[in-house]
Image: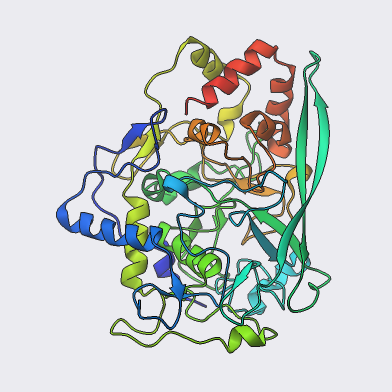
Amino acid sequence: MLASSHFVHSKTNDVNTDEFTDAGGSKPFSHAIKMNDSAFDQYILGRSFFTIPWVEAPSATTARDGLGPHFSSNTCVSCHINNGSAPTISNENQPLRSLVFKLTQPSKHSSRWSMNNIETPMHDSVPDPVYGAQVSIRGNGKVQPEAQTRLKVESIPFTYPDGEVLTLTRFIPYLEKLAYGPLAEETVISLRQPPILAGLRLIEQVSVADIIAWEDANDDNADGISGRVNWLHSPTQDKKILGRLNWKASAPSIIGQTANAAAFDLGLTNPFFPEELCQPAQADCLAAPKGDNTRVGSLDLPMLRLQAIASFIRDHKAPQTRHLDAQAIKGKKLFESIGCVSCHRPTLTTTEGVEFRPYSDLLLHDMGEELKDGRPEFLATEREFRTAPLWGVGARVRAQHRFLHDARAKTPEEAILWHGGEAEKSKSIFIKLEQAERLALLHFLEQL
């Protein structure tokens, strides 16, 4: 098993009191914190690797070659515009490169610890045996793209009790032009859109003890909410690893999340994924040219550069609401009274005593059959997702970015209507509110 200590501890700067930016301002995810000269040098280096395109190896640009052989994008910023998310669906309702197609065999999940694959070093899931854990839509040189990603769109009309009508959308993913034959019969395709990178430094600094204290896995208080931690360590490992980032709390730290994205989205080898992600059946991928060894080694993204990217992501302010108008105050009270805060915990505190308001408990919750995605990750079932932080919702609305893990929701309202499972009670109350009350609650969310 991969040395997991790297995934647990990311290098952090001292907590700076200047942690926040106006959630309603311009580009609220892309304002840097104050830092000393050494940290700023690291930030600038990380920004260059995050924003400047990577190229195929071997290349004269040895600091930035190594793209592929399989990849879907050549920059991090393609999927994280201004450190946020990105458009995921075209005008024709087809996937853009930022909508990732994950491949999983959920029927084999209980046996994952005995199954070894270069794409799942921490045994988070069981990948497809031919295509691996994620579909790459591009290839270098003579390397074929793995497949063309496609969506079937299902429209579902919804009517409120007061007669207001809207249409919900569900995406059914499928593949065309598969380069290496069909998927395995047991393989399920799941969709993932890029999360915003806002405030991850603060989320990383919430204590493990606090997160565990919010658990109620057996719903002992009988409130219908049973959040639980996604533990990432193996059954035989002494040191526990708590997941807190990504849609299913499958990453424990910024550097672990960055390493995963670098490997799967850009095809960059790094300390956590030291081999090219070529499956045995992919002869063209296995035969692709490799980069030359340099003074920093043979990895496309050695640890120092990986840490620089993680520092760039970490050293940004978090969006914070500066002012609520009368309608938003009314909406906030409704948000609290109908039970949304049972999962969307308003305020968290770092180990250094910095209070912040992400509106998440960082725990897994059962979101119901309609959001079941066919992808268990570590302890998270197909129906379980981490409570999505709500800070930055307003900026996402202004950018016309979509919501939920699979981008099915165009608006926060649609996202609410897809809630089920532990959130079914709160959703049902929301549906029965007067239209003015619903609009007030949605207006509050857009101020975050």
For the rendered model, the colour scheme is rainbow
For residue 333, side relative to residue 169 (left or right): left
For residue 91, side relative to residue 442 (left or right): right
Residue 264 lies in quadrant: bottom right
Q: Nearer the viewer, residue 259 or 300?
A: 300
Q: Is residue 448 above or below residue 68?
A: above
In percent of the image, x 82 and y 43: which residue is there?
154
Residue 137 picture location, percent across and down: 64, 66
Total labels drawn: 0
Residue 17 picture location, percent across and down: 24, 37
Residue 220 lies in quadrant: top right
In percent of the image, x 54 and y 47: which residue is there?
86
Residue 386 picture location, percent across and down: 58, 46
Query: Which residue sits furthest left?
Result: 37
In percent of the image, x 23 and y 50: which residue is there?
14
Q: Is residue 330 above or below residue 345?
A: above
Q: Is residue 307 above or below residue 380?
A: below
Q: Nearer the viewer, residue 6 or 74?
A: 74
Residue 82 picture location, percent across and down: 42, 45
**Residue 54 visible at all:** yes
In percent of the image, x 52 and y 26: which residue is there?
446
Residue 34 lies in quadrant: top left
**Residue 9 visible at all:** no
